[in-house]
Each structure stands twice: as C-alpha cells, then as structure tokens.
C-alpha cells in the first residue's frame, strides 16, 4: 500500500515538474518557422535565377566561384523541395482516396434511395388493388352496424356515432375506421449533402493552402526585389557623393598649390630686387 502511494506521488511530482512539461504550441511554431524559412530560400533562389537570366551571355563561359555555404544551402533547398513534392503527392493520393470513399458512399446512398422509392411505389400499387375490396367490405360493415343501432342514433359515413349520448345501452363496441398507411417521410430517406459537403470542404482547404503558399512566395520575391533595389540606389548615391568630394578636394588642393607658387614667385622676385639694389649701392 505504501509503495503504491509513493509511486503515485512520484508520478504526480514528475507531472508537476516544470522541467518535464513541454510547451503547448511549440510544435506548431517550429513547423511555421520551418515553412517560412523554406519559402524565403525559394524566393532567394528564384531572384538569383532571374538575375542570371537578365545577365544573359555577359558572363557565359567564365569561371564562377561558389562557396561551401552556398553549396550546402543548395543541397538543403533541393532536399526541402523533394520533401514538399513527396508531401503533395501523398496529399493528392489521400484526396483521391477520400473522393473514392465519398463517391462509394454516395452511390450506395443513391441505390438505397432508389430501392426505397421502388418499394413505396409497389406498396402504393398493392394498396390501390386492395383498397377497392376493402372499401366494399367497409361499406357492408357500416350498413350492418347502422341496421343494428336504434333508429334515433345518428351515424356518419365512417360508421361512427355522431352523438354518443344517444346510446342508451352500454357495452356497444364501435370500431373506428383503420387509419391509412403512412408514407415514408423524407427524413427517413438517406441524405447525401453531408457526404458531398465533406469532400468539397477537404478539397477546398487543400487548394486554399496551396494558394496561400504561392501568394506568400510571390510576396517574399517582391520584398527581396525592393530591398535589392533600395540597396543599389543607396550604394550609387554613396559612390556619387564620394566622387564629388574627391573632385572638390582636388580642386581645392590645386588652388592652394597655385597660390603657393605665386607667393614663392613674388618672394623670389622681391629678393632678387633687394640683391640688385645692394649690388648697385656697393658700386657707388
């Protein structure tokens, strides 16, 4: 008894332990992240393919440098595409299997419905043949009952006493006319709308998922194209600004060199004049 109690207590502790509990929606989050990663890789690959096609024959025949990371990325992309193709094939097979199942159920339901309709028709035909004889028997029975009743008792067409207070003697057993045979209602007939609805819902969900993935891939391609265009424009703007700075700097340096040369020339001319003046004064 003690061992069983300790075992149940240990199980309770292990269930309440936060380290043993798993996140509730972590599996779905990881699957969604993997799908986004795959779509992003596919969009990048398509963008590179479009750029190669746009370049055309410009780099044809030239040696290309491919890194190991790019090769690993290509292999991973190929593996993901194969897994996705396999999954889509399984989905198509499952869809065909479900369609066949629903079709079989629908056909069986239609056959059962046809059999029910035929049985109802046969019952109606037999009832019409028997109805004439029954009507004659009922008519004879009503006449006999009416003769057996007192003259002051009123009887309707069905042989039922209109006012039972007119019956003075007890124990009179009057049978009411048998009710007509009930026809099968539409609720008893097999319904096929649920089968068709289930098949349409499954196919609609599958197509909606594929359309959503295609839209997401196109959106990623557009975002990558816009990002690359913005990056090119920023690089071109920076290059243009750098060139303008260099041109301006070269012009400023040229002006400074010219001013320096003119200053040195004036200084040299002045020194030459002073030297000549000194030489002339010494001769006098």
Image (spheres, rainbow, N blue to C red):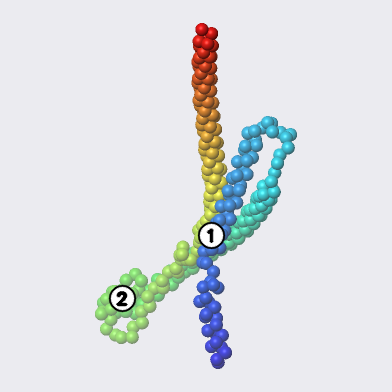
Q: Can you see residue 72?
A: yes
N-terminal of the two: label 1 or label 2? 1
Vertical arrangement, residue 240 with respect to residue 16, above or below? above
Residue 152, image quadrant: bottom left
Q: Residue furthest top?
A: 284
The residue sitting at 33% across, 74% down in the picture is 160
Q: Are marks 1 and 2 in contact (CB under 8 Å)?
A: no
Q: Foreground residue, 110 or 171?
A: 110
Vertical arrangement, residue 217 with respect to residue 273, above or below? below
Kindly state the secondary structure of the residue where label 2 is placed. loop
Q: Residue 243, how many percent across, how many down? A: 54, 29
The residue sitting at 35% across, 73% down in the picture is 159
Q: Can you see residue 262?
A: no
Q: Nearer the viewer, mark 1 or mark 2?
A: 1
Kindly state the secondary structure of the residue where label 1 is placed. helix
Q: Gap between marks 1 and 2, in whole Å? A: 80 Å
Say the numbered circle drawn on residue 185: none
Q: Residue 246, how many percent across, how many down? A: 54, 29
Q: Foreground residue, 96 or 132?
A: 96
Residue 224, image quadrant: top right
Q: Residues within 10 Å of mark 1 (few under 14, many from 20)?
A: few
Q: Which image quarter is the N terminus in?
A: bottom right
Q: Foreground residue, 9 or 267?
A: 267
Vertical arrangement, residue 65 with respect to residue 148, above or below? above
Circle 1 residue? 29
Circle 2 residue? 161
Count of marks placed on residues? 2
């Amino acid at each position: 008894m003690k061992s069983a109690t300790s075992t149940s207590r240990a199980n309770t502790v292990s269930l309440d332990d936060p380290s043993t509990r798993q996140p509730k929606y972590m599996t779905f989050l990881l699957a969604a992240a993997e799908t986004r990663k795959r779509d992003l890789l596919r969009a990048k690959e398509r963008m590179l393919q479009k750029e190669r096609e746009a370049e055309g024959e410009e780099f044809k025949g030239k040696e290309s440098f491919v890194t190991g990371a790019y090769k690993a990325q290509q292999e991973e992309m190929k593996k993901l595409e194969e897994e996705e193709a396999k999954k889509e094939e399984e989905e198509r097979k499952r869809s065909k299997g479900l369609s066949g199942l629903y079709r079989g159920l629908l056909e069986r339901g239609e056959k059962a419905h046809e059999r029910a309709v035929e049985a109802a028709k046969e019952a109606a035909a037999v009832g019409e043949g028997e109805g004439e004889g029954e009507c004659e028997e009922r008519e004879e029975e009503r006449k006999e009952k009416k003769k057996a009743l007192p003259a002051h008792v009123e009887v309707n067409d069905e042989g039922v006493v209109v006012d039972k207070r007119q019956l003075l003697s007890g124990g009179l057993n009057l049978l009411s006319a048998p009710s007509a045979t009930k026809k099968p209602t539409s609720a008893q007939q097999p319904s096929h709308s649920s089968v068709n609805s289930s098949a349409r819902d499954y196919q609609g969900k599958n197509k909606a998922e594929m359309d959503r993935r295609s839209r997401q891939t196109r959106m990623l391609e557009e975002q990558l194209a816009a990002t690359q265009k913005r990056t090119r424009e920023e690089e071109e703007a920076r290059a243009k600004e750098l060139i303008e700075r260099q041109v301006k700097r070269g012009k400023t340096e040229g002006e400074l060199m010219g001013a320096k040369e003119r200053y040195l020339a004036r200084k040299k001319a002045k020194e030459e004049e002073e030297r000549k003046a000194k030489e002339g004064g010494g001769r006098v």
